[in-house]
Image (cartoon, rainbow, N blue to C red):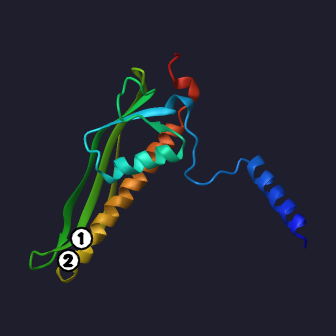
């Protein structure tokens, strides 16, 4: 097959895929009301905060770090925390299993108009514990916490992409 025929076939495949509405997973378009956002959060060092910033920028949204008044929309993160609880203990009263709970609460406003009322989302994961592998288990806990934060970012991005552009206030 010649190079031209191969290129033509690739171009035809790209046109067909774009015409059928194909999109990569996680690339949900956001409404125009979320073109410029300010993230109002107490903890700007959490996995969730960094993941949300990254996802918003990947969706083409500009992040305004300076002022909420100049941004079109404000994402309020009122709760962003992970808590670890003992799930089971051995006969010697040594923890065998832990439960990691990641809780996030957010709302979205645009020029004082509430687009998304305060919503709380909670994800749970449990993991085993071993004193002989303490460093590995601490690393596992950090990885699980980051994965839970990523899953919550996906929930928030899908929720914001479900907003129609008619929900934004008139300028």
Most distant residue in the bottom direction: 132
Residue holding disc 2: 134
Asked if marks 2 and 1 touch (Cβ < 8 Å), the reply is: yes
Residue occupying image coordinates x 41% and y 27% = 109
Distance in Å between CA atoms under marks 2 and 1: 6 Å
Q: Secondary structure at mark 1?
A: helix
Quarter-wise, where is residue 87 in the image?
bottom left
**Apparent side of residue 167 relative to residue 113 in the rendered image (left or right):** right
Whether residue 160 can be seen here: yes
Whether 105 is drawn above or below 130: the answer is: above
Relative to the observer, which residue lies in front, 103 or 71?
71
Q: Give percent across and percent down for residue 15.
A: 80, 51
Residue 169 in picture, x, y percent from top left:
50, 19
Please identify the quarter of the rendering in which residue 38 is found. top left
Answer left or right for 171 relative to 37. right
Mark 2, residues whose alpha carbon is within 10 Å: few (<14), some, or many (≥20)?
few
The image shows residue 52, relative to residue 130, as above or below, that is above
Camera-side residue of 129 and 89? 129
Residue 117, can we see it?
Answer: no
**44 up-or-down from 123: above or below:** above
Q: In percent of the image, x 22 and y 81: which residue is there? A: 133
Question: In the figure, is residue 57 to the left or right of 119?
Answer: right
Q: Secondary structure at mark 2?
A: helix
For the point 71% across and 47% down, which residue is it?
A: 21
> Where residue 139 sits in the image (x, y, percent)?
28, 70
How many marks do you count on the picture?
2
Q: In the rendered view of the protein, which quadrant contains the N terminus?
A: bottom right
Residue count near mark 1 (Cα–Cα under 10 Å), binned few <14, some 14–19, many ≥20: few
Q: Which mark is residue 119?
A: none
Displayed quadrant of residue 104 = top left
Q: Position of residue 25 (x, y in %)?
A: 58, 54
Instruction: Quickly name the residue at label 1.
Output: 138
């Amino acid at each position: 097959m010649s190079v031209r025929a191969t290129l033509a076939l690739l171009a035809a495949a790209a046109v067909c895929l774009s015409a059928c509405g194909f999109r990569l997973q996680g690339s949900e378009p956001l409404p125009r009301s979320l073109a410029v956002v300010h993230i109002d959060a107490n903890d700007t060092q959490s996995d969730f905060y960094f993941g949300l910033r990254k996802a918003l920028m990947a969706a083409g949204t500009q992040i305004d770090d300076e002022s909420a008044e100049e941004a079109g929309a404000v994402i309020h993160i009122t709760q962003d925390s992970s808590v670890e609880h003992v799930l089971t203990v051995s006969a010697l009263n040594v923890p065998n299993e832990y439960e990691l709970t990641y809780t996030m609460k957010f709302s979205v406003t645009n020029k004082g108009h509430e687009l998304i009322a305060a919503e709380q989302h909670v994800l749970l994961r449990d993991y085993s514990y071993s004193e002989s592998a303490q460093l590995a288990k601490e690393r596992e806990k950090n990885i699980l916490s980051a994965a839970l934060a990523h899953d919550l970012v996906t929930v928030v991005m899908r929720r914001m992409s479900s907003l129609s552009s008619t929900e934004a206030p008139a300028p």
